[in-house]
Structures are given as C-alpha cells and as structure tokens.
Image (cartoon, coloured by chain):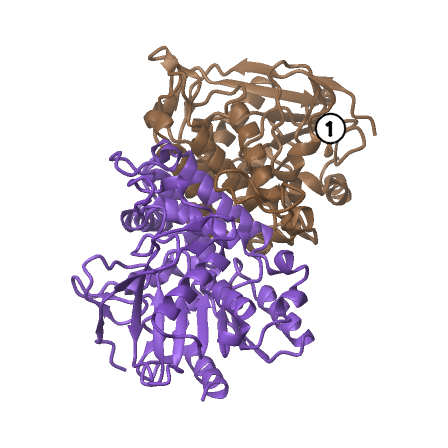
Chain colours: A purple, B brown
C-alpha cells in the first residue's frame, strides 16, 4: 500500500449559525476538514470519519499544512511522526487506496470537531461579539452539536447523504448520533471502541482530567489566551490520566515492566523519573501540551461525558428506534474505558428494534488505543461490512 | 462487639538515628503510636499493624486525641466519623475484643509511618539542623526504612519479638519486609491486598499523583510550609486519582451509575459537577486536602513505588529464602491496583522455598478498598490463621 499521497487541510465558513443543545447559537462557525478519494458525480460515495478527543481533520495521508502535528493517542502517537515536516494522518492505516476506508472507491471526509483547536471554531477562536478568544465563555457543547456542525459542512459541500459515518471512541458516539438524529441521511455506521454512555469510572477519569486543568492557576478561569501563560501543568496531568486509561495494564507490563530509567539502580529521587513508565508519561504530557488547547480538552471531555443515549431517549431501545443505518460495532477485549459490554448493549438494543447490526469483539492487548493500533484486524471486517451495505 | 474503648496517641523519641537505605541518617526521630489490649509479662503477644498511604497510628477505638481525623480511603472513609470529636480508628472493624486482631488476647501496636504527617517524623517535621520544616529536603525513604523505624520503636518499648505483623496495601509491604529483614523476630505475617512490587500501571498512577502535586505552583519546590500556601489543587487531583484506583468500576456503577447531581437534567456547565460521581470526587479531595500533608503523600508514594522484592534480592524466590514467619495472604477479586496475581506470585515463591503459606482470594466487589471494607469476611480467616501460628 502506498501511503505517500499528500493532503491539505481546507476551511469553510458556515453561512448559518449553529443551534446548540444548550440553547445558544454559535455564529461565524469555521470548519476545518480534509477529503481523500474522489467524489462521484452522484455524490453517493461519501464516508464521514469522526475523530476522538485529541484528533483533528488530518486523518490520512501526509499533510502539507504547516500546523499539522501528531494527534494520535497512546502508543499510537509514536509511529506517526515521519520525516521532518511530514505528518501522517491519525488513521492513515485505515484510510487510503485498498485500506479499510478505500479511497479508490469512497470519498472520505474528516472534519475537526466543533470546540476543537485545529482549525474548527472552538474556545480558542475569536468571539465575533467581543473580538477576543472565547475562552470559557464558549458555550458548552454536546455530541449532537458536533454532528449538527458536520452536517452543515457537508450540506455546504453539496453532500446530503452518507454511505457511512465511522469513528472510534468519541468518534463512534458521533456515528451513533448521526444514525439517530438523521436516519434518512446515513446508510451505515461504523462504531469502534465506543459507547452509548460512558460508565461512571470513565466519567470520573474525565472529571479528574478537567479538575486538573481547571485547578491550575494558569487556567485563569478559562481566559488564559493572551496572558502568556497556559495551564500546562494541569494539562500534562490530564493527559497522563487519559493516556493510562487508553492503555491496558498488560500492555504497560509488556512495554515497561518495572524497568528503571537508570541502568544500575534507584537513585532515591523524589522529583525525577526513576522508572521508564514515569519518564514516558512526562514525555507524553509535554508533547501533548505543546499541541493542544486546554479549553478544547475541557469542552470535548464534557461533551463525551454528557453523551447518554438512554437518558436522552428514555431507554437505549427508544434511542435506536429511528435508526435506519446498518450498524457495525467493533470492540476490543482489553478496552476497560469503553468496554465491550457497552457495544453489546447497543447491539442488543438494535436487535430488539429489528435493526441490522453486527458486532465484532477483537481480542487484542492494547486497551482503548486498539482502535488506532489494530488496523490490520479491523480492515477486513470493515471492508466486508461496507461492501454489504453500500452499492 | 463493643467499639467504645477510647485510646490516646502516644509519642516516643528514638534515642538513636535511623540509618536509611539512601545512605543518610535521620536524627531525633519521633514515632507516634497507639496500643490496644494488654501486653503479657512475657511480651510475647504483640501484633504490629502497619498502615497504608493515608493512614495513621489511630487504627482502632475512639480517639481522645484532638488531632485525630478520619484517615480511611475510598468508600470506607464515610463510615468513620462518628459523633462530634469521636473518631474511630481506620481498622476498628478488625481490631478489638473478639475481632480479627483480638485485643482480649493480643497487644496490638500501630505506628504512624516514618515520613508521615500524623505525629511521626516526616517532611513537615522540624529539621534539627536548620530549625525549619524539612520539606523536600527530607531524605527519600523506603519501606525498609519504615520497618527499621518500627523496629526501633518496639525495642524501646521492650518488644523484641512479634506474634504477627499485619497490614493492607503499603502495610502489607511492611509485613513482607519484616519477615525478610528480621526473620528471627516475626512468628507470622498477614499480608492483605498487597504486592511484592507494584505493576507498571500502579507505578504510573502513583507518578501521576506526584506530578499533580509537584506541578502545583503552590508546592514551591516542596518548601511550602510557613508560606501560607499549600498545593491543595494538586493534592486534590492526586487524591481523586488514588480514590478511583482504590475502587472497582462495578462498585462505582453500583453506587453512582450515571446519576446527575441535579434531579432534572444536565445544566450545561463546564466547571461545576453534573454527575454524582463528579461531586463525590470533589468532596473526597477537599476533605483529604484538609488533613494530609502533600509532601508526605509524595514520600510515601515514592516508597511504595520503590518496593520491589525481586529487584532487591535478584528474584522473588531469593527474597523469600530467609523468611521464617508463617504467611497469610489475602487478596480481593476486584482489586486491580494490587491484583490477586501478585499475592499468587508471593505464595508460589514461598512454597518453592518450602515455607508455610496460605492464600485466600476473596470474591468481593469494592476493589482495593476491600481490605478496609470486607472486615466480616477477613475476620474468620485471620483468627484461624493466628490461632494456628501463635500460642
């Protein structure tokens, strides 16, 4: 497979405001997006790929955009940076000619989420009413708001119907929301390592990450832009928490065990890393802090915590009643943040409503990060599913 | 059973310096301790109980000491505060007349650990060389240093031999260290929810907690005493991380599910708790920050991370070779921080060396906190074990 196609992030300003679940309207929304593969004249071969908490519009290929930066999570982050200035998309192993989302056949679109910090309007954008960055005056957003924004972009691009919506984690929530909110527009959804509602331990991890950011005095109530300070310490800890929850304990054992940084013995230091896993965490934190906006982390973490199809629709079965799309669910045995049981719940609710659904549980050791790492094992499942659901 | 006996914390100044693994010596070490039950004239009925990261010397009874405060972890914290000013010991359900550690028969001793903040010399104590609190100039300590200090205290009390050393978590590490370092002094050890070496995910959680404290600017390089500021935000996040790792995901599901704080609906707030589990975390953090010294957290976290019998002795079997004590191991099925597999490793190493060991795996849902909560199920196991190993 040839990975060397280049892409450039594009930007589109939505003509209409986005109406949000919280009751507010967002004006002058800009959306960053990339596309891969050709659009058919009938505009019927579009796959929307949705990113997770720390992703961006650069899902595949080598970016020629100067601001492109590695946005993968966990172990996956390390194999992304290629030659200097050449940054591979976060799901490049899944999107391209002959890959799971085959760009010889499909026109794949990926947008940076509403609330993001990589080109789409978010808390670090300028509020047109004040001329200053929104900061924490940005409205609290939901997964439904993200999907609304994606739909507005696609309509501007002349796309009314999607062959598929696909994503992992928060991206999978968006795929579910698409099928529920716009059933007539979606032929199929691919929901990977995701859930209908994060379990309370997941709610807690997200809350801890946000508390860490907001507790950093440099956060300044969310208005740190232009002050020369940013909540880097709090963000670093938030990232460390996220990072460990994305991986499994056995994966950490396999990778680091209890190996020391120093080859000889412990050094009796309180402040410096002694173990390789400690050093790794610091590295992950510092590289993330450089490329990600703390407020975006807060807003997206809040949005994914809010997502709860059973609460919004009374029951999970009720939520699935309107779905017309065929559904592919993939979960990973070692994912304790978005455990397979959540995908099983979705499968059962869809089946109870007579919908077409298939669920694949992949035995794999890397935890939640598997959706970024286990490309070879997801590919045949997704290709076969898409062949069966699209013309 | 009658829980109403009262106790007072006592203090003893060690006449000799404590020689530490790091090569430094600590002078003028004070140890806070409590005792329950009568010492026989032969001084042969002593059980040393060792506390975990956030515990203190007040293990049982109702304290009459003005500084006593709740020091339990997790769900267990909530059932500790009785009537105003009356604080039950952190293991009161296990220590007392007719209980697991039966004070009708044994003289139970519990000390605040070296490095602690509840009466024993630690980083918030005055450094006799400078007249100021040690802060981060306190030497880095190990589990072996804690045990050395406990031994020095007991000798001052005229106690040379222990019927048992018992503890959970970090307390269990001390029990293991006692049996290995002073085999001739220990008849039996009771090692609950503990390990011979934290797995790398546990190393990571501890590192994240310490990064959170040290990243708080109020930490001031560890010299916050007397400045009117303390790293409360960082400590709060550290405590939240610890708290969630002490509990199991099913326990959180059972207790909180995804229930909202507000009875009606989400309130679209970025900064305030929306879910009951979020509110609970804030409460746990703020009550912990009021009663615990941040530097003590750092030092004890570092010490329990360092503990690694296989590294120190070449192999785990080597570590067990000198043991003479009979060993009781208890682990809990839902404990993912100190998983049953670690206790199994210890059992196998002891068996391979021909030692007397029994291992009990208790099926229980609360995670690591079980050692504080599952008192009724531990009691018969411990009583029977002690009957078989002591006169």
Query: Residue A128 or A121: which is nearer the viewer?
Result: A128
- The residue most toward the front is A16
Q: Position of residue A350 (x, y in %)?
A: 63, 73
**B72 above or below A81?**
above
- The residue most toward the right is B1
Query: Residue B143 or A112: which is nearer the viewer?
Result: A112
Q: Position of residue B289 (x, y in %)?
A: 51, 27
Query: Residue A263 or A388: which is nearer the viewer?
Result: A388
Which residue has dot 1 on it?
Answer: B106
Q: Residues within 10 Å of mark 1 (few under 14, many from 20)?
A: many
Q: Position of residue B383 (x, y in %)?
A: 76, 40
Count of numbered tags: 1
Asked which quadrant contains residue B140, the reply is top left
Give the side of residue A94 with respect to residue B278, left or right.
left
Residue B143 can be seen in this image: no
Parent chain of label 1: B
**A92 above or below B199?**
below
The N terminus of chain B, quarter of image: top right
Query: Residue A141 or B252: which is nearer the viewer?
Result: A141
The C terminus of chain B, quarter of image: top right
Q: Residue at x 42, y 27 (%)?
A: B231
**B30 above or below A186?**
above
Give the side of residue A101 with respect to residue B364, left or right.
left
Asked which quadrant contains residue B244, the reply is top right
Give the side of residue B200 with respect to residue A198, left or right.
left
Residue B297 can be seen in this image: yes
Q: Position of residue B39 (x, y in %)?
A: 71, 21
Q: Residue at x 58, y 68 (%)?
A: A343
- The residue most toward the top is B131
| Circle 1: element type | loop
């Amino acid at each position: 497979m040839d990975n060397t196609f280049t892409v450039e992030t594009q930007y589109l300003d939505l003509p209409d405001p986005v109406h949000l679940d919280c009751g507010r309207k967002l004006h002058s929304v800009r959306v960053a997006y990339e596309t891969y593969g050709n659009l058919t004249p009938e505009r019927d071969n579009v796959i929307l790929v949705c990113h997770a908490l720390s992703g961006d519009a650069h899902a595949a290929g080598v970016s020629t955009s100067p601001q492109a930066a590695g946005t993968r999570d966990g172990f996956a982050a390390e194999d992304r940076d290629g030659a200097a200035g050449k940054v591979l998309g976060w799901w490049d192993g899944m999107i391209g000619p002959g890959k799971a989302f085959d760009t010889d056949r499909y026109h794949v679109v990926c947008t940076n989420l509403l609330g993001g910090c990589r080109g789409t309007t978010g808390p670090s954008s300028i509020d047109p009413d004040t001329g200053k960055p929104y900061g924490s005056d940005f409205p609290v957003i939901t997964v439904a708001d993200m999907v609304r924004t994606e739909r507005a972009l696609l309509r501007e691009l002349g796309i009314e119907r999607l062959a598929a919506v696909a994503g992992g984690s928060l991206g999978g929530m968006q795929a579910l929301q698409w099928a529920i909110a716009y059933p007539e527009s979606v032929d199929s959804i691919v929901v990977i390592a995701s859930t209908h509602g994060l379990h309370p331990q997941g709610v807690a991890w997200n809350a801890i990450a946000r508390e860490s950011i907001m507790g950093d005095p440099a956060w300044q109530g969310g208005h740190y832009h232009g002050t020369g300070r940013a909540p880097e310490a709090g963000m670093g800890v938030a990232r460390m928490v996220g990072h460990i929850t994305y991986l499994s304990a056995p994966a950490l054992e396999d990778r680091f065990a209890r190996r020391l940084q120093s080859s000889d013995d412990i050094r009796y230091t309180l402040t410096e890393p002694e173990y390789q896993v400690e050093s790794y965490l610091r590295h992950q934190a510092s590289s993330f802090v450089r490329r990600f906006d703390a407020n975006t982390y807060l807003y997206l973490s809040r949005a994914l915590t809010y997502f709860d199809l059973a609460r919004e629709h009374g029951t999970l079965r009720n939520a699935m009643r309107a779905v017309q799309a065929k559904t592919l669910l993939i979960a990973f045995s070692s994912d304790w943040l978005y455990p397979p049981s959540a995908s099983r719940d979705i499968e059962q609710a869809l089946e109870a409503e007579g919908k077409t659904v298939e669920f694949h549980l992949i035995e794999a050791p890397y935890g939640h990060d598997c959706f970024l790492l286990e490309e070879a094992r997801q590919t045949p499942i997704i290709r076969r599913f898409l062949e069966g659901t699209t013309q």
